[in-house]
Image (cartoon, rainbow, N blue to C red):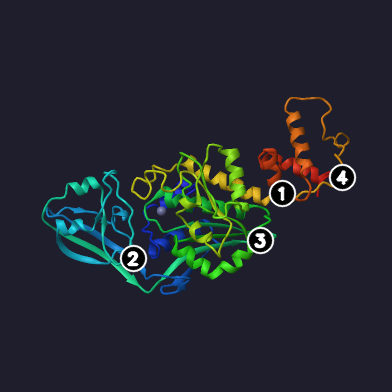
Amino acid sequence: MKNDSMYDLCWSMFKYPRSITGDGVRKTLRHIKEYLPTMNIHEIPSGTKCFDWEVPKEWNCHRAYITCPDGSKICEFKVSNLHVVGYSVPVNDWVTLDELQKHLYSIPDKPDAIPYVTSYYEEKWGFCISDKERDELKEGLYHVYIDSEFKDGSLSYGELIIPGDLSDEIFLSTYICHPSLANDNLSGIAVTTYLAKWIMGLSKQKYTYRIIFVPETIGSIAYLSKYWKQMRQKVIAGFNVTCVGDNLNYSYMPSRNGNTLADMVAQHVLSHLHPEYKTYSFLDRGSDERQYCSPGIDLPVCSIMRSGYKDFPQYHTSWDDLSFISREGLQGGYESLKAAISCIEENWYPKVKILCEPQLGKRGLYPTRGIEGHSKKVRNMMNFLTYCDGLHSILDICNIIDVPMWELSILVETLKDEGIIE
Ligand code: ZN
């Protein structure tokens, strides 16, 4: 394997020409499969009905550019795949500057950024260009050339099932459809891949893991249309992994319900690890939680993010490149999700087996001398035990007594081994 970090993985896949279908997606999935050999790559044929949607024709862009009146080439697809509007129809024509302007996309207040634009469901062609470069275009005839192809092909996605002791599932989903964009897209792919590697390396895990790499929206809808019934029965918590690579902020996008196990755990982890984190409203949703939390599907899926989509100026522009994400940023996103998954794995409903307070001294659990730091430990233990009524989960208790779950894991094991709780 060539790469050995999440950042390297982002780096090596940055230029793949991703879209909601096509060879760039397959190349991305094959690359992920080098890390996750047991992941299966599936294809859903164009035209397949998925609820209210239909898998579109497969799109591939081979080459594209504009030749200026002076003979120079601009907006070359091979230089940046952001230059071509996703799902552009083929064109090979000479147009005036006025006509060309109708097909150009730029952002005036971000003059050197190339925007990310797609047109999946409306037939058109277009180029994305920095506003600065657009301003410099002279009158004259331009040769516009997009060698793209639509065919009855398929939508590709990756699925990895890691069996656990229980058939109840933890669900991870990330999307694979954005072209050269780092935080809003590659970070999610890299962090999900490394989380899957970590889970597969565990000696045992309680839950079964369903981990999918799908194109956003149409991919999650297509996947749900196949598996939503079993997922509704099995999934106890899920995370849509997106925007986990920058080093600025931490944030949380709730599920629609806002009150699921995934939400509880996300808030627990962030409030202890990154208390300055930002909480979004579900009204700010923008990724596949839109599908996973839609009425009737109602999966317990939320997101733990670094800077949330739309909240960073680089969003959906060429500014969201490999310099916007970092090793530390990706590591922070990864560690937060890993902590959330560990909390779910270690969550259960303890019940004290002894009436009244257990005599801890005779078990060596109660220090006879007051040592600095011990008093807090003892206080946590007594507080923990007092809620071990079989009705509160460990997570519930940790929230009540305001202690991170991972700080009590040794204590919980000890109390279990001593026969004090069950
Ligand atoms: Zn996006």
Identify the element where label 1 is drawn: loop
Image point (61%, 45%), residue name: 339
Q: Going from the N terminus, do you reach mark 3 or mark 1 first?
A: 3
Relative height, residue 361 to residue 16 (above, below)? above
Mark 1: amino acid: Ser
Image point (39%, 45%), residue name: 322
* Residue 266 position within the rendered picture, expressed as x and y whole percent measured from the top left: 58, 47
Identify the element where label 4 is drawn: loop
Q: Mark 1: few, some, or many residues within 10 Å (few <14, many ≥20)?
A: some
Q: Which mark is residue 168?
A: 3
Q: Which label sits in the foreground, 1 or 2? A: 1
Q: Going from the N terminus, do you reach mark 4 or mark 3 first?
A: 3
Q: Going from the N terminus, do you reach mark 1 or mark 2 first?
A: 2
CB atoms of marks 4 and 3 within 8 Å: no
Mark 4: amino acid: Ile
Mark 3: amino acid: Asp
Q: Going from the N terminus, do you reach mark 2 or mark 3 first?
A: 2
The residue singled out by tag 1 in the image is: 393
Relative height, residue 396 to residue 143 (above, below)? above
* Residue 189 position within the rendered picture, expressed as x and y whole percent measured from the top left: 48, 53
CB atoms of marks 2 and 3 within 8 Å: no
The residue singled out by tag 2 in the image is: 60
Separation of marks 4 and 2 at Cα, in angstroms: 67 Å
Cβ of mark 3 under 8 Å from ligand 1: the answer is: no
Q: Which mark is residue 354?
A: 4
Separation of marks 4 and 1 at Cα, in angstroms: 18 Å
User: Of 13 and 124, which appears nearest the observer?
Assistant: 124
Identify the element where label 3 is drawn: loop
